[in-house]
Amino acid sequence: MITWQEVTLRLFLAAVMGGAVGIDRQRYEWAAGLRTHMLVCMGSALIMIVSAYGFAGVQMEGHISLDPSRVAAQVISGIGFLGAGTILFLKHEVVKGLTTAAGLWTVAGIGLAVGGGLYFAAAVTTVLVLIILVVIKPYKKKLIVERRQTEIQLRFNREKISLSQLEAMLNTNNIAYNHLKFSNAKEDNICAVEIRINRSMSNKAVLSFVESLNNTNGIKEVEFRPAGI
């Protein structure tokens, strides 16, 4: 049977390791910050302790057969609900919070390792997580080339320009696009359009089209977001 000193040590270490990861998330003001990571890691350690030692009396009964590891196994699947709460789906198909969600899942694993007495594995994992979150992040853009599509956002008067005329202008200027979104603005007779240009189009060609839009009667506003590398 595990001693109370060992239980205290494991819960304390789990809180410390979870807090080490949580500090990084707290710096970026995520909802899942320092305290959340500490609680997840410590709670996982507690569940692991219960799973490993909480059924000792029951297992001694010869007519009872059970698998205590199933209790700890539910932590990994259950943490998904908490991780889902940290993920935000923003406009333009931008997703935020995946790193925090993955961090929570990993912290739960660290807690299970500490609760099971695997201190070295938990410590190494904590160090690696901090390296991934703190050290690698500044070099991510240098290591991985990211390219977003060129976007054109414009607002025009529907009384002066129709949607068919706008489409004709795109075809006339040989603008290849893969996304065209229309929405009504708050102002009367004003339509907002978002156009995503194919990556095959050069920024120079698109900019020429933007200039022609800017000189078109009825166009209220044009915003050009060139593709970034």
Image (tube, grey):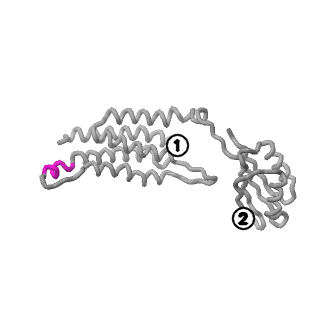
If the image is split into quadrants, where does the N terminus sit? top left
Q: Secondary structure at mark 1?
A: loop
Q: Secondary structure at mark 2?
A: strand
Q: Is residue 63 above or below residue 45?
A: below
Q: Residues within 10 Å of mark 2 (few under 14, many from 20)?
A: few
The residue at the point 83 percent across, 63 percent down is 161
Report the disc number at residue 28.
1
Task: Indicate left or right for 107 with 153 as reference.
Answer: left
The residue at the point 44 percent across, 36 percent down is 129
Q: Nearer the viewer, residue 151 or 221?
A: 151
Q: Nearer the viewer, mark 2 or mark 1?
A: 2
Image location of residue 3, percent across then percent down: 19, 40
Query: Where is mark 2, residue-wise?
Result: 184
Image location of residue 110, percent across then percent down: 36, 40
Image location of residue 66, percent across then percent down: 21, 53
The residue at the point 85 percent across, 64 percent down is 160
Report the disc number at residue 126.
none
Q: Quadrant of residue 122?
A: top left
Q: Amino acid at mark 2?
A: Asn
Total numbered labels: 2
Q: Nearer the viewer, residue 26 or 61?
A: 61
The residue at the point 57 percent across, 35 percent down is 140
Q: Residues within 10 Å of mark 1 (few under 14, many from 20)?
A: few
If the image is split into quadrants, where does the C terminus sit? top right
Q: Is residue 46 magenta?
A: no
Magenta residues, start to end: 54-60
Q: Amino acid at mark 1?
A: Tyr
Image location of residue 14, percent across then percent down: 34, 40
